[in-house]
Amino acid sequence: MKESQLCARLRQDKGKGPSRRLRRKGEVPCVLYGIEKDSLKLSINRKELEKLLGEAHSVIEINYDDTKQSAVIKDIQYHPVRGDIIHIDLQRIKAGQEISVAVPLKFVGVAPGIKMGGIFQELKSELEITCLPKYIPNEIEVDVSMLNIGDAIHISDLNIENIIIRADKKTTLCSVAAPKKIEEVVTAEVEEEEEEEEAEPEVISSKAKKEEEGEETEHKR
C-alpha cells in the first residue's frame, strides 16, 4: 500500500455557479465522506490531482484546515466533451475497518500465444475488493506468461492473501484468442464437412435408386 498526499481546502459555497468558478481557477470540487462523520465539501488543485492519478497509489492522505485524513477515491466525474475532471468523491478510511475499493489490474509477462499470432484480450481493467486499509494494493498483477492460444485467466486463478474479490470466481480477466485467419480456415473446414455430411445421404439414395431400376429391368426381361 502506498499512501500519497493531497492538499485541500474547505469550501462553503454550494451549487453549480460556485463549482464552475472553482474549475475556472484550476480547482476541482470534492466531497469527503464516511466512517460516521459529516460530509465535507473540499476543493483540490487540478494539476496536483492529475499528477497523483498518474502515479501508483491506493490510499491518499488529505490535508485540510490543519487536519489529516486517510481516504480512497470512490468516484471521479469527467467532462463529457473536454475530458477534464469536474468532480471527485473521497471516502474516509479507518485503520482496522474493512473497506471496499476498486483496484486496477496490471498484466505482466509475454504470452507464448501472442508470439504464435494470437490476439491478447483484456476483459477486465480493475477489480472491486474488500480488505483492511493496510492491505489495499496499488494494483493487482496478473501473470500472462503461460497463456497459449485459446487459454484464459479467471479470478479463480488469482492467489492474493488478505483480500476478498467482490466478483464471481468464474469471471474471465484476459485471454488469448486465435487470429482471425485461423478462425476463418477452421470455420470453412467445419462448413465443408457439414455440407459433405448433408450431401452424402443424397448420393447413397441416388445409387440405390439406380440399382432398383436395374433390378426391375432384369425382372421384365
Image: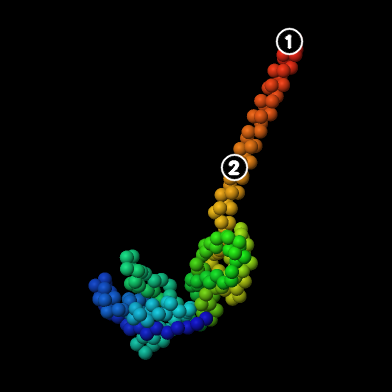
User: Number of marks in the image?
Assistant: 2
Reading the image, the residue beneath label 2 is 191
Residue 89 position, x and y percent, is: 39, 74
Identity of the residue drawn at 72% across and 14% down: 216
| Figure check: 166 above or below 181 | below
Residue 74 shown left or right of residue 191 in the figure:
left
Residue 30 position, x and y percent, is: 35, 76
Quarter of the image for residue 23 reads bottom left
| Figure check: 24 above or below 184 | below
Q: Is residue 91 visible?
A: no
Residue 154 shown left or right of residue 24 in the figure:
right
Instruction: Inspect the image, locate mark 2, and give the three-letter code of the amino acid beneath it.
Output: Glu
Q: Residues within 10 Å of mark 2 (few under 14, many from 20)?
A: few
Q: Nearer the viewer, residue 118 or 75?
A: 118
Describe the element under mark 1 as helix, strand or loop.
helix
Identity of the residue drawn at 42% across and 77% down: 53
Identity of the residue drawn at 37% across and 69% down: 77
Instruction: Inspect the image, locate mark 1, and give the three-letter code of the amino acid beneath it.
Output: Lys
Quarter of the image for residue 27 reads bottom left
Residue extending farthest to the top is 221
Q: Which mark is residue 50?
A: none
Residue 212 shown left or right of residue 167 in the figure:
right
Quarter of the image for residue 193 reads top right
Q: Is residue 134 visible?
A: yes
Q: Nearer the viewer, residue 181 or 127?
A: 181
The answer to whether mark 2 and mark 1 are in CB contact below 8 A is no
Reading the image, the residue beneath label 1 is 220
Residue 151 position, x and y percent, is: 62, 60
Residue 100 position, x and y percent, is: 49, 72
Identity of the residue drawn at 45% across and 79% down: 55
| Figure check: 86 above or below 187 | below
